[in-house]
Image (cartoon, grey):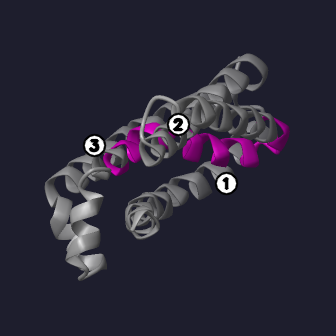
Amino acid sequence: MILAVNTLLMTFFTLFSYVMDGFAFAAEALSGKLYGAGNGPGLRQLVRRLFAWGAVMVTVFTLAYMGGGNGFLGLITDDRAVIGAAGDYFFWACMVPAAGVAAFIYDGVFIGLTATKGMLWSSLVATGVFFGLFIAGIRVFPANHALWLSFIVYLASRGGMQHCIIRKQIIT
């Protein structure tokens, strides 16, 4: 049952990631062009605009997820038992947009700047955070809540680390 619930809820992550990948692809092309031209102010403005649009997407998706709730789940499956069991974890899926937006946007910027080393390090450290938090979390929370908490923190810490890396090393 938990596997079915998590598969169902990960659909919300996948949907958000497809939309945010469009912003990441734009970030790749535009940041590469601006960085290559030596246009630091333009690059900083691009990142600000991407995050402004990211904030709009976070708001839209979070409100849609919260408002759609079981209705959206019913579009994906007709199994009432799975939909009912997903209710205990649905709030985690609603947190995905806010937690993941920075990682998606910065992935595009890092790729555009060919600064993939920063992506590697942020992913590596965030993975360590994920496993450390999960191992500690299962002692305090039910296992699936610990898993979702770890995933949300993974997304947020990856974006947060990328922000620190890009501010310190690239966009100064």
**19 vs 168: above or below:** below
Q: Where's residue 15, x and y in %?
A: 42, 64
Dot 1 lies on which element? Answer: helix
Give the amino acid at mark 2. Answer: Ile
Q: Where's residue 153, x and y in %?
A: 52, 34
As measured in the structure, the alpha-carbon distance from the residue carrying label 2 to the one carrying label 3 is: 30 Å
Mark yes or no: residue 42 visible. no
Kindly indicate the quadrant of the structure image that contains residue 117: top right
User: Where does the magenta region start and end?
Assistant: 93-118
As measured in the structure, the alpha-carbon distance from the residue carrying label 1 to the one carrying label 2 is: 41 Å
Of callouts 2 and 3, which one flags the residue occurring earlier in the amino acid sequence?
3
| Residue 59 disc label | 3
The main secondary structure of the magenta stretch is helix
Of callouts 3 and 1, which one flags the residue occurring earlier in the amino acid sequence?
1
Q: Which residue is mark 1?
A: 29
Q: Name the residue located 70 percent from the left edge and 26 percent from the top edge.
A: 166
| Residue 138 disc label | 2
Dot 1 surroundings within 10 Å: few (below 14), some, or many (20 or more)?
some
Q: In the image shown, does 159 or 28 lie closer to the viewer? A: 159
Kindly indicate the quadrant of the structure image that contains residue 141: top left
